[in-house]
Image (spheres, rainbow, N blue to C red):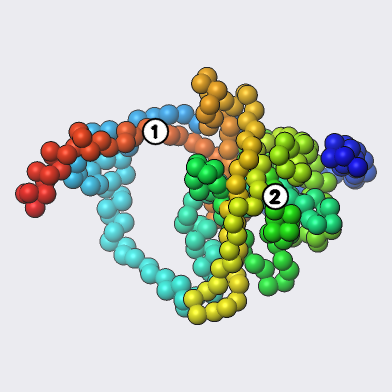
C-alpha cells in the first residue's frame, strides 16, 4: 500500500471518528481559567527599542533603566539555593521547566515498527548546528512505560518535527496525553498528515514549518554514579525543511516571526506566544578594541 493511500485512509478514519463524536466539546481549561480574558487573535508581535538603548561598556545594570530600581531592590530578599542531589527528580523537573523559559516545542511525528503513527509535543528541543543541519530532542524516561516517540525513532531512524503556531495549539496539546502505544494521535488531534519528501513519516499540514529528519546520533543519560538510564538524547539530521510561503519574509530565505505566530512552553501547563522584540547589534572587536584595552589598563 502506498504512503498516499495510507494517508488518505487516515484522513478518512479521522473524519469518520470526528463525525461520530457526541455533540459536546472537550474543555481545554479549568473553571478558574475560564474567568480569564478571551484569547486575543490579533497579532501581538512587534519590534521596540531595547530596554537600555544608551548602554555603554562597563555599565552593567543601568541605574535609570526600566525596572532597574525594582530589580536591585529584589536583591534584599536574598536567594534560595537548591541542591539538586537532595531533592526529588519531580521537583527538579518543575524548577527547571519553570525557569528555563520560553522553550520551543517540537511537535514530533513518528511511526512504530508495526506501522502505528504517533504524534507528541516535546519541549526539551532546540537547534544544534547548521553544518551539518541538526536538531535535538531529549526524552525523560517514564518508570511506567517507554516513550512511544523515543521507541519509534530508535527503531525506524526517521521522524518529522513540526513547529506549533497559535491556531492549532489545542490540537497539539491533545497529543501530550499518555495514551497506549496502539493509539493513533492523528485521530485524537484531528490534524492532517502531509506526505514527506525524504522520509516515510508524514509532516503536519497545519504546521507552517516542518523538518524531515533522520536519526543522526542517540545516547542514553544516567545520573552520576548510576547505571540507570533516565533520559535519552537524540540528534536529528534535517534532510528537508518545508515552510509556508505565507510566513516567509520578502527575501524568501527567512521566516517572519509575526506571521509564524509560534507557541512556546513555560512551566506547568502554561504556554506563551511572542510579544515584543528588539534588536541589539553584535559587538565588533575592531570597534571596541581600544576602549576595552584601556579599561583593562585602568583596572
Tell me the element at label 2: strand
Query: x and y percent of residue 285 in the render?
Result: 23, 38
Residue 271 visible in this rendered orientation of the protein:
no
* Above/below status of 68 relative to 166: below
The residue labelled by disc 2 is 158
**Disc 1 from disc 2: Cα separation:** 37 Å
User: What x and y, as percent, mark residue 20?
Assistant: 93, 43
State which quadrant residue 47 falls in: top left
Instruction: Say which of 56 and 116 sits in front.
Output: 116
Residue most extreme to the top: 250
Up the image or down, 31 lies above or below 37; here it is below
Q: Which mark is residue 278?
A: 1
Residue 141 x, y percent position in the rendering: 64, 67
Side (left or right) of 29 relative to 115: left
Q: Where does the image place residue 32, in percent across and percent down from the top left?
A: 64, 51
- Is residue 273 among what the camera can see? yes
Vertical arrangement, residue 205 with respect to residue 294, above or below: above
Label 2 environment density (alpha carbons within 10 Å; few <14, some 14–19, many ≥20): many
Closer to the camera in the image, 103 or 70: 103
In this view, the mark in front (1 or 2): 2
Please report the residue visible at 8 percent of the width from the left and 52 percent of the height from the top: 299
> Crowdedness of circle 1 by 10 Å Cα count: few (<14), some, many (20+)?
few
Q: Earlier in the sequence, mark 1 or mark 2?
A: 2
Which quadrant does the N terminus fall into? top right
Relative placement, left or right, of 84 versus 112 is left
Q: Which quadrant would residue 15 be assigned to in this image?
A: top right
Amino acid at each position: 500500500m502506498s504512503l498516499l493511500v495510507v494517508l488518505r485512509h487516515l484522513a478518512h478514519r479521522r473524519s469518520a471518528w470526528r463525525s461520530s463524536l457526541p455533540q459536546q466539546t472537550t474543555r481545554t481549561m479549568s473553571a478558574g481559567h475560564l474567568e480569564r480574558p478571551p484569547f486575543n487573535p490579533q497579532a501581538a508581535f512587534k519590534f521596540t527599542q531595547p530596554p537600555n538603548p544608551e548602554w555603554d561598556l562597563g555599565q552593567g545594570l543601568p541605574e535609570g533603566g526600566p525596572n532597574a530600581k525594582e530589580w536591585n531592590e529584589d536583591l534584599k530578599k536574598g536567594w534560595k539555593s537548591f541542591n539538586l542531589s537532595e531533592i526529588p527528580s519531580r521537583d527538579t523537573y518543575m524548577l527547571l521547566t519553570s525557569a528555563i523559559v520560553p522553550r520551543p516545542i517540537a511537535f514530533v511525528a513518528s511511526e512504530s515498527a508495526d506501522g502505528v503513527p504517533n504524534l507528541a509535543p516535546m519541549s526539551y528541543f532546540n537547534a544544534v548546528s547548521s553544518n551539518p543541519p541538526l536538531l535535538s530532542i531529549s526524552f525523560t524516561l517514564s518508570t511506567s512505560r517507554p516513550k512511544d516517540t523515543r521507541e519509534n525513532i530508535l527503531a525506524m531512524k526517521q521522524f518529522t518535527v513540526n513547529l506549533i503556531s497559535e491556531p492549532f495549539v489545542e490540537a497539539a496539546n491533545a497529543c501530550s496525553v499518555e495514551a497506549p502505544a496502539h493509539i493513533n494521535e492523528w485521530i485524537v488531534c484531528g490534524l492532517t498528515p502531509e506526505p514527506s519528501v525524504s522520509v516515510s513519516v508524514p509532516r503536519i499540514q497545519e504546521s507552517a514549518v516542518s523538518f524531515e529528519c533522520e536519526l543522526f546520533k542517540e545516547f542514553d543519560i544516567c545520573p552520576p554514579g548510576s547505571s540507570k538510564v533516565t533520559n535519552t538524547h537524540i540528534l536529528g539530521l534535517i534532510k528537508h525543511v518545508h515552510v509556508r510561503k505565507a510566513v516567509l519574509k520578502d527575501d524568501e530565505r527567512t521566516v517572519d516571526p509575526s506571521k509564524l505566530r509560534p507557541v512556546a512552553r513555560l512551566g506547568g501547563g502554561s504556554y506563551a506566544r511572542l510579544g515584543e522584540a528588539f534588536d541589539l547589534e553584535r559587538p565588533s572587536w575592531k570597534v571596541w578594541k581600544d576602549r576595552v584595552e584601556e579599561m583593562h589598563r585602568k583596572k
